[in-house]
Image (cartoon, rainbow, N blue to C red):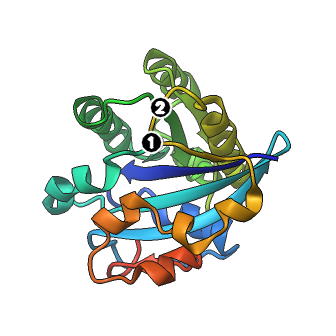
């Protein structure tokens, strides 16, 4: 069994449910009232895919305009991007195009793109059709999925697709970590990645190495 360790950056407009999506999967919980993310939050989770183990190191970035300048610090060396929008907001969908341009201008190595339309439980208030979203995702060579962080519909499939996408990146990028020995991949030295060492401020590498959720302020 191989163990893949990849960095995933979570991008999208404020209030689309980025943190709700991750906490639904990682913690199996949903909170109706969540304060906006300040800077970024860090999560890790393990996903078994195609007979291999994939560790997702997820950087959940703030969606507010005033934090936009900080974003490149978090998606540097990313192996995958989770681009989230709100199906009931055309504005949030249009903002995805800006994030794609940001990634193209700041990430040199190949990466997996996964575009997600959240809040499928509010389908009667929908402003973005599946056809519209699918057409754009195909134009940027991204996987497209829809989900509801609130009801847990489709959430597991998103992280499964992320893991499978990282497996396909083997040999195509120098920033993806691939270990043949699962025990080696779990050592504290390897889990405390160079990326975390460079980009985490005022958070001990030891806490990240043990897979704890590390919050920079509250989540959104």
Q: Are marks 1 and 2 in contact (CB under 8 Å)?
A: yes
Q: Is residue 213 above or below residue 190?
A: below
Closer-to-camera residue (91/40): 40
Q: Looking at the image, how many numbered discs can be counted on the residues?
A: 2
Whole-percent x and y of residue 25? 66, 64
Q: Residue under circle 2?
A: 173
- Residue 128 placement, left or right of 31: left
Residue displayed at 14% across by 61% down: 66
The quadrant of the picture occupied by the C terminus is bottom left
Q: Position of residue 40 (x, y in %)?
A: 33, 68
Secondary element at tag 2: loop
Q: Which mark is residue 61?
A: none
The answer to which of 117 and 212 lies nearer the viewer is: 212
Q: Position of residue 122 (x, y in %)?
A: 58, 53
199 relative position to 206: left or right: left
Q: Residue at x 49, y 25 (%)?
A: 137
Against 122, is 27 above or below? below
Q: Residues within 10 Å of mark 1 (few under 14, many from 20)?
A: some
Residue found at x 30% / y 58%? 63
Report which quarter residue 34 is drawn in. bottom left
Instruction: Work out whether residue 56 or residue 17 is closer to the camera in this orientation and state it.
Output: 56
């Amino acid at each position: 069994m191989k163990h893949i360790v990849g960095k995933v950056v979570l991008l999208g407009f404020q209030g689309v449910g980025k943190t709700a999506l991750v906490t639904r999967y990682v913690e199996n919980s949903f909170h109706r009232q969540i304060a906006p993310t300040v800077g970024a939050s860090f999560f890790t989770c393990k996903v078994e895919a195609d007979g291999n183990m994939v560790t997702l190191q997820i950087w959940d970035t703030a969606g507010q305009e005033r934090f936009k300048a900080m974003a490149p610090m978090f998606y540097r060396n990313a192996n995958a991007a989770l681009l989230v929008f709100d199906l009931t907001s055309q504005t949030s969908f249009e903002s995805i195009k800006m994030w794609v341009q940001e990634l193209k201008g700041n990430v040199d190595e190949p990466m997996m793109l996964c575009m997600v339309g959240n809040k499928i439980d509010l389908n009667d208030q929908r402003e973005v059709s599946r056809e519209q979203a699918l057409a754009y995702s195909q134009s940027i060579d991204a996987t497209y999925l829809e989900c509801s962080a609130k009801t847990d519909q489709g959430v597991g499939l998103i992280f499964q697709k992320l893991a499978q996408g990282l497996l396909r990146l083997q040999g195509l990028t120098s920033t993806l970590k691939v270990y043949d020995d699962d025990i080696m991949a779990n050592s504290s030295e390897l889990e405390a990645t160079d990326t975390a060492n460079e980009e985490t401020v005022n958070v001990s590498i030891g806490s990240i190495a043990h897979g704890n959720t590390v919050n920079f302020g509250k989540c959104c």
